[in-house]
Image (cartoon, rainbow, N blue to C red):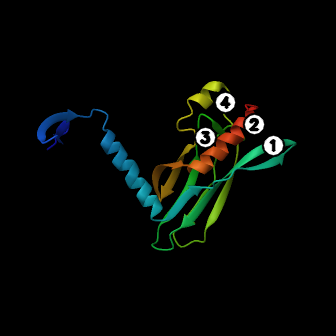
Amino acid sequence: GSDATGGTLEVRYAGHSTTLWVSDETDVPGRYLAARCQELAVASVARLAWSDRVRVVTRDGEEVGVLRLLVRPTGRGEGVLRIETISGTPMISTAGGEVWRPGLTVRSTDRPSQVDLEMQPARCDDHVFMEGGGSTAFKASLTLDGRPATVLLRMSGPGAAAAIAYIRDACGKQ
């Protein structure tokens, strides 16, 4: 059961059962559900995933890391997705220090594509390496069929390891 301020939760354990009243002033389940629904709606048009590699290129005599976002349209439906911006993280920043602005429009029937995003360390202090939770999960602002959406684009384990290794090396940390 539930109402606007809370609901009941039945807990069963060791042959016993108890019902508890719980409330959630911050609406954690509601926020999770809204975010998950946006992820599924975006995935109905295209799968967005990071490459497991970080390339290093030289720009103006400086080495710059390159993240690659892989865009794999589903091949079905009529959805249109536009990737407006992708934010950096506490560890990873754009080469210019702003947000990335891919400006890529993808239809569900398009061919696969990719977006290369130049990166640099956002910070090099020890704290960013010791408390780096979320450092390889990027917030993407999109429009989906003309409506705004926000999704979190997480790197895979190997991709995250490659990105962190690049940042560590760029910061001179061994």
**Residue 94 visible in the snapshot:** no
Q: Is residue 86 left or right of residue 74?
A: right
The reply to whether dot 3 and dot 4 touch (C-beta < 8 Å) is no
- Left or right of 1, for residue 158: right
Q: Give coordinates of residue 88: x percent, y percent.
A: 60, 40
Name the amino acid, label 3.
Answer: Gly
Whichever of callouts 1 and 3 sits on the residue coming sooner in the sequence is: 1
- What residue is disc 3 on? 88
Residue, disc 2: 170
Residue wearing tag 4? 123
Judged left or right of residue 65, residue 142 is: left
Q: Measured along the vertical axis of the image, is residue 174 above or below residue 114?
A: above
- Whichever of callouts 2 and 1 sits on the residue coming sooner in the sequence is 1
Q: Gap in Å between the C-alphas at discs 1 and 4?
A: 16 Å
Which residue, given by chain and number where applicable, does mark 1 sit on? Answer: 63
Say which label, 3 or 4, has the lower sequence index: 3
Q: What is the crowding at mark 2: few (fewer than 14 residues within 10 Å), some, or many (at least 20)? A: some
